[in-house]
Structure formats: structure tokens, C-alpha cells
Amino acid sequence: MTGADRLDRDLEPLLRRRREQGLYRRRRVVSGPQGPRLHVDGRDCLCFCSNDYLGLAGHPGPAAAMREAAGRYGAGSGAAHLIVGHTAEHQALEEELAAWTGRPRALLFSTGYMANMGVINALVGEGDRVLEDRLNHASLLDGGWLSRARMRRYPHADLAALERELAAPDDGRALIVSDAVFSMDGDLAPLGALADLTDRYGARLMIDDAHGLGVLGPEGAGTPAALGISWQRLPVYVGTLGKALGTFGAFVAGSETLIEALIQRARTYVFTTAPPAPVAAATRCALRLAREESWRRERLSELVNRFRREADPAGLPLAPSQAPIQPLLIGDPHETVRLSEALLAEGILVSAIRPPTVPPGTARLRITLSAAHRSEDVDRLVETLARHYRRSAA
Ligand SMILES: *Cc1c(COP(=O)(O)O)cnc(C)c1O
């Protein structure tokens, strides 16, 4: 038996199990730009599963900015930010992100996953505690587990359970970590109450606004701005650039001291290549569009209302979400996949989200809307869903 055979023999049972449980994942091949109309696996589809909430991922503006910057900088960044990878484009983008989110400084990370791992690990360690909402994004949970701090997950948005954890006697620091808009459910975390508990128990608080930035608040400045909560009460703010901004990357915004400390000790910042300057240039253009073109947020909100107004009388299992994330709770993973396949057969792409991404028994269709959708697109989605959902319930 060769080394390759031994490895395959280790892995094959996992693949078999995944297939049997209806949890097997496979990729689709997309050609052409992102947008509601996507060319996928050789056919045209209407897409309701990207995080391109403002319709900027396929917008010609950021693409032109990227080409122009590639002419000046080339494609590669050469090294980490702390060596020679930090360009004038990165610097300007950090300043614009800080101004947008109303915080003293911002620090770019290559991805949101890395930002979350890096920040949690820089803020707590052995002898400390990390208190996380059970439905937090995988990158926040992984960050907590990797930190060597004691990791406690409280039931979703359960402030009483969180308070019990905070009240337990403990010598170390406690870091509360939460998504601001939950990525698979679309509901908002009780940020004001989290900030109150943080103060009452002398804890620390970090929020991940991957799905709020660009979508919520005046000029899309994010969930804290939408709720009118000061940056000092939500002092560690993570935003991502691959969702509403339509490009790639992430950042942390906060005090001068926080950012300087992350530059010194966030390992996923220090030990990785900086994203290429053209990506930063594209993001600067996307940020301008996201801030200035508020019609994109208005349009998005109209489409969310339209979807809910039509889906409710059609008997679809709506979740209490006002966000562009509109999950339909199906429960059984096989049934969820069957529905997603029935939609695909009619040229509509909606992802089936199954465990372990969501808790067992809560498989769902995760529908996401974009400012680039037309009203007729939403009508067609609901009409098609209603036909197949009824059929499956019968
Ligand atoms: C997508 C997402 C991330 C990860 O960001 P990437 O830049 O894609 O790595 C982190 N947190 C939340 C809540 C997300 O939805």
C-alpha cells in the first residue's frame, strides 16, 4: 500500500458518511462577472445566494480601479504588511475605513477569517475566557478555540445565560464576541445590551459586522451606526470587504492603541502576505460607491419587503429577519437539498445550508437579496418556491 492509498483509506469513510447524511458539498463553476444573472456550470441562472448585497462585486468601477492600480503596482504585494507589502493604496483604504465607521483607526487583514482569529488571539490567552454566541460565524468560534482561553458558548442571544457566565467568579479577562447580524439567520445581536453587560462586569466586547457594513446605518456605516451606539461602547469592530463591498479582505477598527497592539501581536496579520494593492484600490472605489449611492440600500430594503410580503401568504417558512439574508427554515437536510435542486432545475440558484454550518435539525435555504435584483426576479423566486414547497409538504 502506498502513502497515497493509506491517506485515501483514512478519508473515504468521511466522504461516504457525508453522502449518506445528505451533507456532501460540491462546487459549481461560474464564468463571467458576479450578479443576479450568473452563468453557472454552463447555464444561465438567477442567483439568490451571494453576499453581494449592494451589487458591487461585478460593478465596472472597482474593476477599472483594480486594472489601473495593477498598471502602477503590478499584481503582487511582495511581502507582509510589516515588511514591504503595505502600499499607499492600503494606507489610504485604512484611513477611509476608519472615517466611514467613525473610529480612530482601522487595520486591514487579508480575510475576515484571519481578522477574527488574529484579534481574539491578540486580546486573550490562557487564564482568560471567551464568551461567544452559539450561532457566531465559524471564524469567531475557531478564534476562541485557538486562543487557549476557556471557551464558553451561550445560547443564541440569551442575555441571561451570558450574564450567568459573566457573574461566575474568575480571575482572568472575559471577552464577549458576537456577530452583529447573524450570517445564517439575518437577525441582529442585542448590541446595546451586550455593551451594558460588558460594562457591568468589566469585560471586553468584540463584534463582527460582516453582514451589516454597507447595508445598515447612515451611508452604510454599519450596525453600530444604525443603532446609534458609540465606538467606545463597541470598541473592537470587525468588518469584511467581500460582502456588501463586493471585493475581498477585512479590517478591524478601533482605538489607536488597539490597532498598534494588533500590528504587534495578531499572528494572522504579522505572518501573512499583504493583499495586492489593486485589491485595495478596487475596495476604495467600492467604498465610495457604497457610501454615496444610498439608492442601493433603499432598493435592497424595498426588495426585502417585497420578498416577505409575497412569501408570507404563500406559506413559506419565513424567519424574523429584516436583513437581505432571508432564510427559509426547512429542517431536514435531504429535503433542503431537494428543494434547492428543484429550484436549480428552473434556473434559480439558492444554497442549501446544512449542518455543520447550522445546528442539526435547522437545515435551510439561505436566500440573499441584492440591490442588483429586479422586482420581477423576486416575484419569480417566490412563485417557484411556493410551487415546490407546497409539493414537498403534501
Ligand atoms: C464571511 C464572514 C466572515 C469571513 O470573512 P472572509 O473575508 O470571507 O474570510 C467572518 N464573519 C462573518 C460573520 C462572515 O459572514
Image (cartoon, helix red, strand yellow):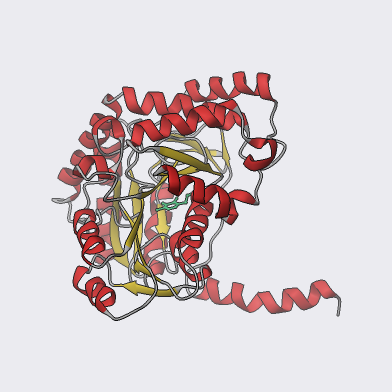
Task: Count the labels in the image.
Answer: 0
- State the residue in front, 90 or 354: 90
Q: Is residue 291 visible?
A: yes
Residue 214 located left or right of residue 12:
left
- State the residue in front, 221 or 98: 98
- For the C terminus, which image quadrant? bottom left
Residue 167 screen position, x and y as percent? 24, 76
Q: Determine the residue located farthest toward the right in the rendered image.
A: 2
- For the N terminus, which image quadrant? bottom right
Q: Which residue is rendered at x = 73% and y = 74% of the image?
A: 8
Residue 309 in the image: above or below residue 285: below
The picture quadrant where one finds residue 252 is: top left
Residue 343 located left or right of residue 242:
left
Residue 246 screen position, x and y as percent? 45, 35
Residue 324 in the image: above or below residue 5: above
Residue 289 screen position, x and y as percent? 38, 24
Q: Which residue is rendered at x = 32% and y = 41% of the image?
A: 369
